[in-house]
Image: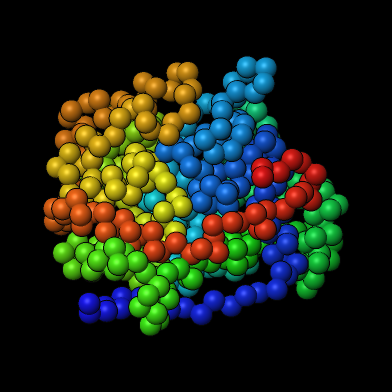
Amino acid sequence: MKLLIISSLITVTTFAKSEVYNLGQSLFFDKLISGNRNISCSSCHHPLTGTSDALALGLGEGALGLGMSRTDQNTHGIKNVHERVPRNSPVLWNVGHKSKTRYFHDGRVELNPNFPNGFKTPEGMNLPDGLDDLLAAQALFPITSQTEMAGQGDENDISRQAAAGNISGPTGVWRIIEIRLQGNQNYVNAFKKAFPNEIKEKEDIKISHYANAISRYQRETFKSFDSPYDHYIAGDVDAMKESAKRGYEVFTTKGRCFECHTGNLFSDEKFYSLGFPQIGPGKGHGENGLEDFGRAGITKVKSERYKFMTPTLRNIALSAPYGHAGTFESLKDVIKAHFHKDGGLSLITKENLRLPNVEGFRPHDFYVIGKRILRQKILSTRDDRVPMLTDKEVEDLVSFLHALTDLNCLDMNLVIPKKVLSGLPVHN
């Protein structure tokens, strides 16, 4: 078989665990930075659930548990979750790679030289100074979301400011988190060690230091370039199974997958509409606010409705379910959905979707797929470029996608701290 190289093998440098890394690790798993001190970054991006949360749509602020066991109520039956997170939790594999130019399904944090630091974000010109990279800028936003980490309405000091849209102001969300960190002596000591030239007193701790530490932890932890595929393109022809080799042929020829899933991350980071079914509460778009316009929600360009960014395929076998709303349980189904006329609607069943059963959420969960006119709107924008594949070709393609799994990422226990600097409990 002719060997078509579409991605160069990267030599990954192993870093000694620096003070910045150790600080970022604690912050990533610490609930102190959330409004109600009940959720951390790791709650929805845990190393043991493929750096996502193993759910179609997650339960954010107020929920308990991890992954499939996540629930909306505590042991006393008191319910604390106000809505589902409206999109599937993005994976973090190679999230700090130098080729990354955008983050989130709609690309709302992206490189743009016309903005401070060169980063365009929902806060426009109001980003803090001193951010190391785009990944650090991205880390500033989950903590501002009422659904994800801030909390609702008048529940706490952070949620009040988030509800008012006060993010970057002198009394906004980012300032409150600075004050929380400055008020914890363990964190003060850790920030001084991590940034000795910038932080002499606790008042020197800024939200940019928080973001830079989180970025360092993610950048160094979630690298994934040691898969059977990487060994194969480096010259080891026995590194992949025969079925994976056939799947690679489908990927690069008839399937045309490489046209969008290209480069070292297998993503062109552009936006396409595949007509995938939408479930969940939506992003506030459309007449009743229950639709998700995707990229158009950011650009306001009608022709970009229902377009979402091409996801990376690295470690894709570890990160089910699939799609921007997590509607597909298996790689086989999400591949078939690319060429199904109904966008894959016939491949899913409501009962099999990974949606924690929360009373009162179901009507919103299935509102859009229950409306024929809305389903047709989504399908009418579809980028129909994918040819029909045989069942055998799909099976081989699945085998190739499994060959993109870095075996070092199968056990991520060592990147999970036993405790965090605040002393709050850790998801592990």
Can residue 1 be seen here? The reply is yes
Q: Is residue 202 above or below residue 343?
A: below
Q: Is residue 6 or residue 378 the one in the foreground?
A: 6
> How far from the left and from the top, in percent, is residue 55?
46, 39
> How far from the left and from the top, in percent, is residue 61?
58, 34
| Residue drawn at the location 86% of the way across and 52% of the way down | 185
Left or right position of 399 against 92 = left
Left or right position of 193 against 258 = right
Q: Is residue 185 above or below residue 5?
A: above
Can residue 141 be seen here? The reply is no
> How far from the left and from the top, in percent, is residue 21?
69, 65
Q: Is residue 214 or residue 51 the one in the foreground?
A: 51
| Residue drawn at the location 37% of the way across and 31% of the way down | 352
| Residue drawn at the location 75% of the way across and 50% of the way down | 418
The quarter in which the N terminus is drawn is bottom left
> How far from the left and from the top, in percent, is residue 54?
48, 42
